[in-house]
Image: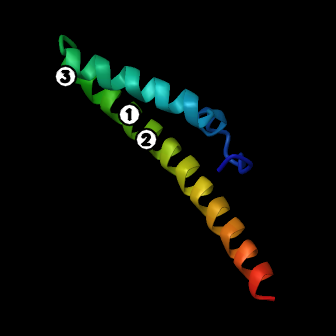
Amino acid sequence: MGTDKKTGDPDERLSYEQARAELASVVERLEAGGTSLEESLALWERGERLAEVCQRWLDGARERIDATRRAREDSVTS
């Protein structure tokens, strides 16, 4: 995810840390209550998008770790 910025979606330019911090803020606002139904739904939708960004970063990190492990194992067995 880190290098794939083909879409014009500004969320795609968020770092993992930025997306996670904003997601935490959204969760806090939802838990605090006091918002209208419409605002709560908008916050929920924003949270879903931010969670997807975070998941893509985590998936990318996992892929890099797995690739590094495979390369190391291949060099040991060769």
The reply to whether the C-beta atoms of the residues labelled 2 and 1 are less than 8 Å apart is yes
Q: How many marks?
A: 3
Front-most of 78 and 46? 78
At label 1, counting other C-alpha atoms closer than 10 Å, the crowd grade (few under 14, some 14-19, many 20 or more) is many
Front-most of 56 and 61? 61
Location of residue 42 in the rendering, given as x and y in whole percent from the top left corner: 33, 27
Q: Is residue 15 above or below residue 35?
A: below
Residue position marked by numbered label 1 in the rendering: 47
Mark pair 1, 3: CA separation = 15 Å
Q: Dot 2: what SS?
A: helix
Mark pair 2, 1: CA separation = 6 Å
Q: Tell me which residue sits at (39%, 20%) in the image.
A: 25
What amino acid is labelled 3 in the image? Leu
- Of the two numbered discs 1 and 3 in the rendering, the one whose residue sits closer to the viewer: 1
Residue position marked by numbered label 2 in the rendering: 51
What amino acid is labelled 2 in the image? Ala
Sooner in the amino-acid sequence: mark 2 or mark 3: 3
